[in-house]
Image (cartoon, rainbow, N blue to C red):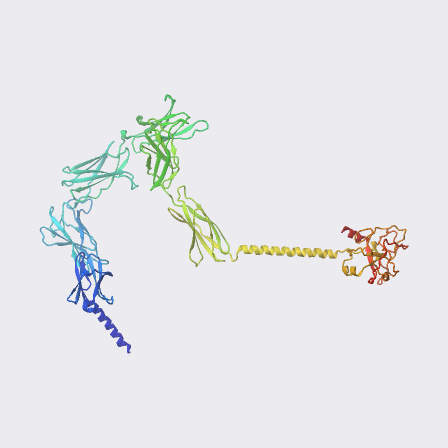
Amino acid sequence: MDLLPLFFMLVLISVCKGQHHDSCVQPKDQYIQAGSSTEVVCKTSCVHGGIFWKINSKPVHEGWSQTINSTHAVLSLRNLTLPSATVECRSVETQQIVGGVIIKTYKKPGNISCVFHYDSESSVGVPELLTCTWEHQTPPREKVNYTVLTSAVSHTSPIEVCKTKVTNCTVRDFYTSERIGIYVGDNFTVTVRAKGQAWEVHSDSYEFNLDQILKINPPKFSVATSSDHILVEWTRQRTTPKHRCQVKYRKAPSADERTPVWMSNKTLITELNVTIRIEEKLESCTEYRVSVRCGLGEAPWSDWSREKTVLTKLNKSQIRLRLWRKVTEVRSDGVRRVCAMWTAIPAACPGRFTYEINQISLDQEHAVQGSQIYTSRGNSTCDVTVNRDARRINLTVFRDEVPLAEDSVYVPAVGESLPQVTDIQTSARDGVILVNWKAPNQSVSGYMIDWTHDGNQYFWEETKHTNASLFGLLDKEPYNITVTPLFDDKAGHGTQAQPTCSGVGDPGTVVITGGQASDRTADVSWETQSEGPCSAAFVSYTVFYRTQDGPLLNMTVDSKKQKVVLKDLEPDTLYRVYVEATALTGVTRSINERVVKTNKFDPNFITVLTVCGCVLILLVLFLGLCCAVQWKRFRDKPVPNPGLSSVASWSLSAQQKSMCLFQPFSNPCESTFDKVYTEQTPDSSTPSLTTISSNSNTTSDETRKYDDSALGQSNKPPDPIMTQHPRFSEETAAFLPSESSPGSPYRSQTSVGTQKTKTDKPWKHVPGKEQEKVPAKTVYVTLDMFEHDQAQ
């Protein structure tokens, strides 16, 4: 509750402050006429120190302001033309606004013009309407009401004749109104009053004469034709002097706005029946559209009358056949085809027309050697077959069997030396093809230019200049253009320019053909299809792509590329892709869109992982196969055959025992110190078998050291006994006893008698070292074991 009085006090202070500011600058917001002057007063007592002025936030020159009695500062504004001016009085010390005013300007209406005219073309007599228009620049967003006031010599005060909110107004029955009281020949003035919300202004008075502002209706005329002119006739409705008229005519149909329009002017003074003769720019048997308009003295022109169409008659003197030819290359049989073409007489001309073609062969002296006649009715082309020699083609046109005109053209011989133009340059602009060429060195009488877009319909034109402009072309079509020099009675060889388009067509279409994606990239490719030979060439391609909720991204390449790689994509994400092709004539969007989904993982990583896995599997299989082979070898070790085995004692030294303790039986340690002692030596009469030693030598020269106690003999070492394989028939079929079985399946190598051998060298006893006693070992020896060892 204590804050409520404080709130009312602040509001009162702000209101008083605003009133104080308003009272410091006088006058308040105002409107003044543009170009006039005004003054703005600021009380200097409202501020401590000096003041300065600003208009539309810009400082005002000090010379515009004056101080009066040290209590007021006056700003003088001279010839103010600004639509709106915000004037501010500011304190020099604090830069604060002391007060301000908004001054708006307004202008008076100007450039008033009036027309005294008829309500319709069929009206006659005195015109019914007076229409006045004017110009006025109004303040922004200001609603203005206008009033038209007129006064005559007989009336001293103006009369309001029309009210409107726009800048024109029409008064009906202006001349016949008794209230206005204006008569023919009288001058009257027109004033326009403009009124806004806070201002009002009158225009200057404009004086008019009814005869000077009278706009008559166009005349009702008739048209007649002859062989060489058009007659336009009508009857005047008024005999006012200086009656001027214009006749406008042009070819029909005139759908093309660029069709030339010709005017025929004539000034009339006293005659009532008017005849205007048109002779210029007329062509035989051609339709023309004609219209007329007139005006009285200095009064405005009437509207153009409705057009009338008229057909001109055939003028014999204007008939120009304009014969030309196109010659093909010579065939293998020496024959050439000549396409003769000419400008036919318009089909609108009455009568029956016949065209006759004569082919005349010329020798070197230009003598006539023969002729052929081709008759064509109603056509403007004819094919003629000629040989390699020079020819002259003649054309004659007949009307109802009466000759009207003729023309001829020269066909050069094959290989004839004739000049031709060079350096043909073509360009197209706004549907017109411009052709330039370089003249030959020889003197020529002119040039013939022919062009076609389909090879069937030809157009041609003769000129004496080295340039030409081709009009009336089909839009966006390629044209073949040929330039041929002309001489007095001959035509040279033609030179053909490169095909030129009359205009650049729309660019072709774009089709996206491929889209392959990895986890972070995507390959997008496309193809273009031309709309026609004159389609605009693409200068760049822009590939747009986006996710469902992401921003639209793009990548631009030049026209030489039709494939891009989109990078920095999100894995396992759908992207919509389309292509925009830019040409000089516009932009074409691809007719299809492509949806590309990136992979969750890099395909290369999966490929490497797969390859590594396959290699590892193959390695495991290889190692398993090796192990299986080794296991099979271990399982398939040879087992002694009892039928081919014998038992013998094998003496091993301590060193050999330690070395060969775990060696397989099939591969015993081979040493020159090992000897085999059989339990029973064969008889001396038994033939010796092949002596086997570990080194495969028949006799060992090395000295062996044996322990006497181990052998159970005298100190003299016995001779080493070589293991021998007796013949099977001589061996005793005695089996070794076995503890587990009553008989052993292995045979003992015991023979009938014992044979002693002598040592080659005496046995040496090593003093100081007692020989280790090694008991004799019983081993089994088979023939297949030795065979296996020898095989190794």
Compared across the picture, whether 177 is left or right of 493 comes to left
Residue 62: % across, % down: 20, 61
In the rendered image, the quadrant that contains the N terminus is bottom left
Q: Residue at x 62, y 56 (%)?
A: 616
Query: Is residue 458 visible in the rendered structure shown here?
Result: no
Left or right: 677 with respect to 266? Answer: right
Residue 398 location, x and y as percent? 31, 27
Residue 337 drawn above or below residue 534: above
Asked if one can make out residue 625 in the rendered structure from this viewpoint, the answer is yes
Instruction: Name the quadrant containing residue 274.
Output: top left
Q: How many marks?
A: 0
Closer to the camera in the image, 19 or 121: 19
Near-viewer residue (513 or 405): 513
Q: Position of residue 721 (x, y in %)?
A: 85, 55
**In the picture provided, is 721 more to the left or to the right than 229?**
right
Quarter location, residue 495? top left
Query: At which x and y percent is residue 279?
Result: 23, 34
Q: Nearer the viewer, residue 589 or 767?
A: 767
Q: Is residue 158 left or right of residue 405?
A: left
- Work out whether residue 311 or residue 728 is closer to the camera in this orientation and state it: 728
Query: Which residue is rendered at x = 13% and y = 40% of the image?
Result: 241
Q: Spot the residue most to the bottom.
A: 2
